[in-house]
Image (spheres, rainbow, N blue to C red):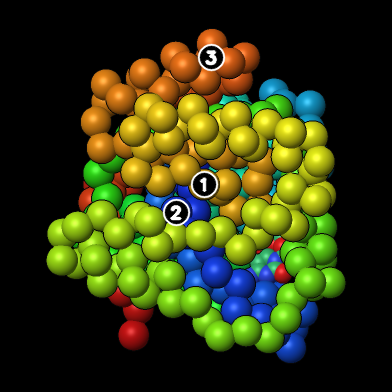
Amino acid sequence: MKSLRIRSYAKVNLGLEVLGVREDGYHELRTLFQTVDLADEIVLRPQAKGVRVLCDHPLVPQDGTNLAARAAELVRRYTRVTKGVEIRIAKRIPVGGGLGGGSSNAACVLLGLDRLWKLGLGPDGLHRLAVKLGADVPYFLLGGTALGLARGDEVYPLRRQIRAYIVLVDPGISVSTARVFARLDGRLTPRENSNSIYYFVSRQLEGSGGYRFLQNDLEEAALEEAPELRAQTGRIRAVLLRAGASLSALSGSGSSYFGLFEDARSARRARAALADAGLRALVARTLTLEQYRGAWGRYRYRLSQ
Ligand code: C5P
């Protein structure tokens, strides 16, 4: 039986509002997700039995705790399939960078096994498995420019898909999302919802940028969690903005900062300026919902009742 090779894309959060703590301990969010074309390579190879994960990155577990392995086990349990799979992951997405690498890998394993084992579940049927794996996993069943509500796991594609260049800055620090949220709790005060994402979406519909409305409510807590990141923040932001970024922000709970650029030339200039300042950066492009789906080739999306 043939193997399946998959590109597992990263995301950035263009904006992220934390509205409060939920009864389940998670946080009620409103976030804008955007896929970028930086990707891990995953190869799924059919096996007679069992689930095995191999990854070339020292910080990624290669046992049953790996989110991609948990995704495979969940599919097997849910569908009662007894076949096995070997999952090879070549890491390109920084780990602990707020770019959703682990969640993306898990969603790709769900979609990949659905195809490999001809289960016919589709993104719709896989959604209930995705929510069990993590708050960002359902987003990666869709991709593109999308609004995430509730824990971030209730996802709605936006009508206007963003086409832009994203300069990703990797400070080489791994930040724990759980710890950033825990820090935030100490400081979370009931407040009026800022509506920044609402303003952004309405400006986008009118065709103007609206990026200046966006904010990331996790940034201050992330910088407390990683003081060595705070030391670099001013420099990163200054270089991105000087190069003409429409938006410069922290992605998710960090540690990656990014700048959004309308044209390739300014994006490349920003990357060069970051390199001159001793910072590791790369230029990526956004992927629309259609492009993300296209990456899944002839995949048939079946809607269940
Ligand atoms: O769902 P996931 O395992 O990716 O989330 C990592 C951690 O981030 C959770 O354990 C939780 O502490 C925190 N989190 C949260 N509220 C969210 C999403 C994540 O508190 N909406």
Residue at mark 2 to residue at mark 1: CA–CA distance = 7 Å
Q: Residue at x 68, y 86 (%)?
A: 190
Indicate the quadrant where residue 226 lies: top right
Nearest the eye: 48 or 293: 293
Q: What amino acid type is highlighted by mark number 3?
A: Ala
Figure quarter occupied by ligand 1: bottom right
The answer to whether residue 134 is above or below residue 235 is: below
Residue 10 visible somewhere in the drawing:
yes
Q: Residue at x 56, y 85 (%)?
A: 192
Nearer the camera: disc 2 or disc 1 = 1
Nearest the eye: 71 or 292: 292
Q: Residue 14 bears which disc, if any?
A: 2
- What SS does tag 3 mark? helix
- What SS does tag 2 mark? strand
Q: Which residue is mark 3?
A: 275
Q: Which residue is mark 1?
A: 249
Q: Residue at x 24, y 66 (%)?
A: 203
Q: Residue at x 84, y 72 (%)?
A: 186
Q: Position of residue 65 (x, y in %)?
A: 80, 50
Marks 2 & 1, CB-CB < 8 Å contact: yes
Residue 52 visible somewhere in the drawing:
no
- What SS does tag 1 mark? strand
Q: What amino acid type is highlighted by mark number 2?
A: Leu
